[in-house]
Amino acid sequence: MSILDSKIPEGPLKDKWTKHKNDINLVNPANKRLIDVIVVGTGLAGGSAAATLAELGYNVKAFCFQDSPRRAHSIAAQGGINAAKNYQGDGDSTYRLFYDTVKGGDYRSREANVYRLAEVSTNIIDQCVAQGVPFAREYGGLLDNRSFGGVLVSRTFYAKGQTGQQLLLGAYAAMNRQIGRGKIKMYTRHEMLDVVIVDGKARGIIARNLITGEIERHSAHAVVLGTGGYGNAFYLSTYAMGSNVTAAWKAHKRGAFFANPCYTQIHPTCIPVSGDHQSKLTLMSESLRNDGRIWVPKHKKDVEAIRNGTLKPKDLVEEDRDYYLERRYPAFGNLVPRDVASRAAKERCDAGYGVNKTGEAVYLDFAAAIERYGKEQAYVKGLNVEDKALVTKLGKKVVENKYGNLFQMYEKIVDQNPYETPMMIYPAVHYTMGGLWVDYNLMTTVPGLYAIGEANFSDHGANRLGASALMQGLADGYFVLPYTIGDYLAHDIRTGEIPTDSKEFDEAEEKVRADINKLINNEGSKSVDHFHKRLGKIMWNKCGMARNEKELKEAITEIAALREEFYKDVFVPGTENEYNEELAKAGRVADFLELGELFAKDALTREESAGGHFREEYQTEGGEALRRPEFRFTSAWEYKGKPSDAVLHKEELTYENIEVKERSYK
Amino acid sequence: MNLTLKIWRQKSANDKGKIVDYPVSGISPDMSFLEMLDVLNQELIEKGQDPVVFDHDCREGICGSCSLYINGRAHGPQTKITACQLHMRSFSDGETIYIEPWRAEAFPVIKDLMTDRTAFDRIQQAGGFISVNTSGNTQDANAIPIEKHNADMAFDAATCIGCGACVASCKNSSAMLFVSAKVSQFALLPQGQVEATDRVLNMVKQMDDEGFGNCTNTGACEVECPKGISLENIARMNREYLSASLKG
């Protein structure tokens, strides 16, 4: 019997959340003033949670490692946010959003959580508009929508290619209102380095002031982690340089189970790697697949000619191009979900059809869209639709209005004009569906310790659909956690302030200091980045888009060996009592070196393919992911000292409201 | 490429600071400016020296962390990009490049090229929000149609990334472009009208209290803004401020 209790409320799916809200304990406004909550991370999830908890009356202490809450990496989300508003009248509904999300996650997420997400999605849009978030509008003044991968409706709200920025600034503004009122105490340039557990409950954190190096104790009645995902274990990713797993990993080491670490999203449309110096990869929004067509040449001789520069891609005639997504998936075409699109790109490149020097790039072509829009414009304006130059000019204008900032970004990085020649793209690590295991209340296996947004595992199963991360972050922070946390805090109204001079705080602080001393006094010879890059190579080559038993076993051995070498030979300059980025990085990489091993172990034990987790041994004849019914569970790992000793707990997944089928986009 | 870097080094806020020369070689034109600094820092670490400190995070031009004054210009020689989006192909082999932090009284240096920009946060806390509770119990998002032109202008103002290039470029270290971008976003939307009077008065007061200078309409901020925030926002804020003052 599993020791995991997901606490899913009884009753029909559509009534669960309402019923749960009616059943749980509340804390009266006067008592809320006596209760402290720590929120770590100020992205969409953490920022919206901090603002809402403060507004409800709790005393909030919020922490971020950046110099301002506004810089959390949610800011970089481009494409949009889903909501089942059905403003387009194209048949959308709460159920359909729920269905698409569960199917998109390859039937590896929890029905009740996903349904709740779909249910509150519409509130998010109302809320954000009320806050002054400037979503894109149509000429009639109403909100505009576009379509994303894996769905057949237009339910994505957006603000050009900067939706994440606008939503985060909305949450940041809500936080600012509470900071101004003194209800949130904001700690910027602070990094959480441990959770403090007192009598089995999360009662505070140990944080390091990144400017002075001071180690600080902060207590609270509950701790909320909105600290994002762990994709930087791969070194190269679309994450920010500072994104890390440290907060979640420290929580794991204190008893929070880590769920499905191997579920990683590799996004199909990123700018390809150009050289060894590269520090990060840049995403080109999924929204581009609304209009861009993905292809590689049909014949190897053309691939050669393109690579050596004797043939320009735009001169290759239509019949010699392979629009492989349209060929393999006629129903969804270029808008298949991310995992499917990424694997298809890898398949073509592995077969030798990659179009750049490294052989790892495919084309994303806007020529057809430019012509289509141009003709439309010419027709509307009563001009000659046969005039090619005119049509191209008009078409480019339309494309610029839609994707101008993305095209500009591409041109700055690659030094090629995507209006004239197709973009080159290749998949890159973008998001992690896995994370801390949480129950329906978003509480981890440690009482009083919550995980929200990308930091938890709950809503996306084995693959996340586009424009759903922003939805989940804000749903958790604005509308779910503020309710569910009250149920727990209702028992703390008489507890009083949590003292920080207890032996538990002493022990946690000592441990943090010891870890820092070890790193700073290590007289090694190699930089932190040296080890991080090597870890990234192992992860990408052996735990990336396609995995197999042999390589996963190698990865486990190699990561363990690398970790040992890291502690022997890493060199961290400077001291602990000053701003020291290398020291902060060293601590983060040390945690990635443990997480990486658990990641590979999780991928090894999941003997099936599902969503972003593709095991070469388990595929259909057509090369699609082959799910296995005996693996219809969430893997939640318990820390036992070393990643190799971690113990697996299974949460069985049941589907009562959705028929589990082969996930087909053909 | 081989380059000579002249970089501002300052141990702490109280240190005097000075320019130090660093030669770098083997730089690829495809590297971003920050990746070029990574190369230098790896060399310094290998030699056991302190790496150069600079703010950076997303490295795709949206978080607003990076804040380098390169050859006398905020974010370097190109327009409408941040330092992390600047690539070395914009420089020539053998060039000498000066790299300094933002210079403004309200942005004290923390270390080397890193400054304290929390003054911007405090201005936002003074009024850069709409006081609506986050309960979700608001009216339907489509209940108020908003003219597309105004919605688009509000969006353009809202794309400010809070990097501070406007302040660094201004001879008076004025924060008018930054503050007016927020004031304009809300002034252009019906949701922002209710608190318009207090917002502009409070934000401008906080701006002055933080020690930012006055605006003398030279327009340097608009030229150097990586997001192309328009000077029109300053004009709009001045109108808002005037009418609020008359009311208040």
Image (cartoon, grey):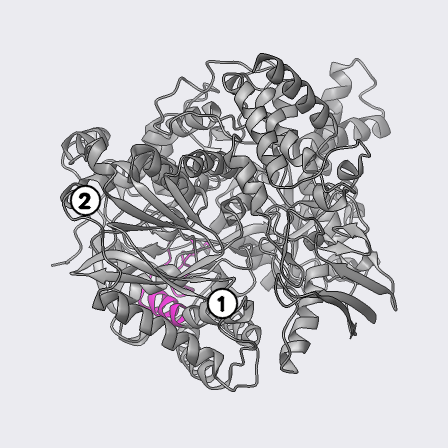
Q: Say which quarter of the image contains residue A55.
A: top left
| Residue A31 locus on image (x, y percent) | 20, 37
Residue A326 visible in the snapshot: no
Name the residue nearer the viewer: B73 or A537: B73
The amino acid type found where label 2 is placed reads Tyr
**Label 2 sits on residue:** A488
Q: At 59% from the left edge and 57% from the top edge, which residue is drawn? A: A348
Compared to residue A85, the image places residue A140 above or below, namely above
Q: Residue at x 43, y 68 (%)?
A: A592
Placement of the N terminus of chain A among the 4 image quadrants: bottom left
Pinpoint the chain carrying mark 1.
Answer: A
Where, by quadrant of the figure, is residue A627 drawn? bottom left
Please name the residue shown 41% across and 18% down the image.
B140
Which element type, helix, strand or loop, lies under badge 1?
helix
Does the magenta run of residues contain A607?
Answer: yes
Q: Residue tagged by mark 1?
A: A584
User: Is residue B243 positioned above or below A655 on the image?
Assistant: above
**Residue A375 image point, x, y percent:** 75, 23
Rounded to the nearest angstrom, the CA distance separating label 2 from label 1 is 33 Å
Q: Which of A598 and B246 is in front in this view?
A: B246
The stretch of residues the image draws in magenta is A594-622
- Residue A254 is left or right of residue A4, and the answer is right
Q: Mark 2 lies on which chain?
A: A
Circle 2 Cα neighbour tier, 10 Å, few/some/many (<14 / 14–19 / ≥20): some
Q: Position of residue B27 (x, y in %)?
A: 77, 69
